[in-house]
Amino acid sequence: MTVGSFSPGATSGAGELLQLMLDGTPRTRAELIKLTGLARSTVGARVDALLAAGLLTPSGEAASTGGRPPAQLAFNPDAGVVIGADLGATHALVALTDLRGRVVAEKAFEIDISAGPEVVLDRVARTGRALLSGAGRRRDELAGVGIGLPGPVEHSTGRPVLPPIMPGWDNYDVPAHLSTSLGGPVLVDNDVNLMALGEHATMYPHVEQMIFVKVATGIGAGIISGGRLHRGAQGAAGDLGHVAALHGDGIPCTCGNVGCLEAVASGPAVVRALLEHGIDAGDTRGLVRLAKSGDLAAATAVREAGREIGHVLATCVSLLNPSVIAVGGLLAQAAESLLAGIREVVYGRSLPLATGELQIVASRTAGHAGVIGAATMVIQHVLSAEQVEAQISSAAAG
């Protein structure tokens, strides 16, 4: 992200002032003085620093109260761009966004996550560079890269930790690989955490308590608590797929355990269950097609998977008391059957106080929650008060 040059003395507090402007409301210098209670000269220096950095931009004029109308300023979402990547077991979506998380360009493609980090990440990097070039943006305009992986991630380092379906990825330095190819910073998280972040930022920004559930090759959950993503002590919060399922006795799971929810209610698990009854759906996409076309056996199997997920979510509802549960992922495309099973059990098992205003809904981001969340993670980092001041100070020193 290109940052202009100006006096180092102007930078102190500029990052904090920017936080007021991130709501998108244009304001005059006088309004900022009133909001902050700071001296005119202090606000002026901070505004000038942010204007020079390109993070604020003129935005018309306010209504005149006599004399020349005062100029308004607004946050400039075009000051930089972000690359967000959402990786699944068999698919990838890479997007270029502005600094509000609005998707400018995107590219979806098939992958095999088990092919290893070098193969997959090189493809992500090539795609990211192509999106930058296609949008006419330079590498120095890239504010950062965010990536979601389908397995446990130590968020502080960006390294996967013993991911069950990702051989060769354990402890791999994903940020170093992508920063070499694209530049940094590079932030990494579990894909479902980022889906929760993206769904929340886009569709439910005022919801304080929310759970996003992904049902695809695996099953996971992202938790929004107090309006913020809750990762847990080591980043393992929301690992819903490896909670014991009600009817999972003896069924082996990819994690090495038996009886996990993922082993009985994920897309591949439902496909296997149908095959035992002589119905070959092929894969999860085939299962979704069957269910949506009205195939009774497929719809019934998906609804039963929803019931299994609902038993686990009923416990989550009692513990976390969310106001929204959004369900996404490939199997959720058969939303009518899957949601029916989830709702049946959650509303039946949880206390009325917890479910009285609870919404259990299909994801509304049309498959973009992951890339929007990846971009949002980067944006929240690079536009934090500390990072803005560091960027400005670095440019001034240079």
Image (spheres, grey):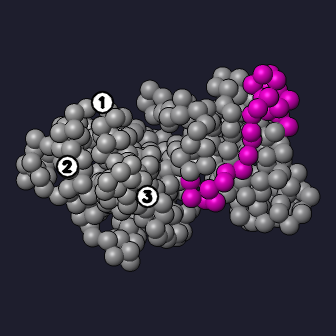
User: Which is more N-terminal, label 3 or label 2?
Assistant: 2
User: Which is more N-terminal, label 1 or label 3?
Assistant: 1
Q: Picture quarter containing residue 294?
A: bottom right
Q: Picture quarter containing residue 40?
A: top left
**Label placed on residue 49:** 2
Q: Mark 3 points at which residue?
A: 84
Distance between mark 2 and mark 3 Cα atoms: 28 Å
Mark 2 or 3: in front is 2
Distance between mark 1 and mark 2 Cα atoms: 19 Å
Name the one closer to the observer, 69 or 203: 69
The answer to whether residue 378 is above or below residue 250 is below
Residue 107: x %, y % from top left: 49, 71
The span picked out in magenta is: 344-369
**Label placed on residue 37:** 1
Q: Residues within 10 Å of mark 3 (few under 14, many from 20)?
A: many
Q: Which residue is drawn at 48% across and 41% down?
A: 152
Name the one closer to the observer, 381 or 396: 396
Residue positioned most to the front? 66
Q: What residue type is labelled 3?
A: Gly
Q: Is residue 126 visible?
A: no
260 relative position to 373: left or right: right
The answer to whether residue 395 is above or below residue 153 is below
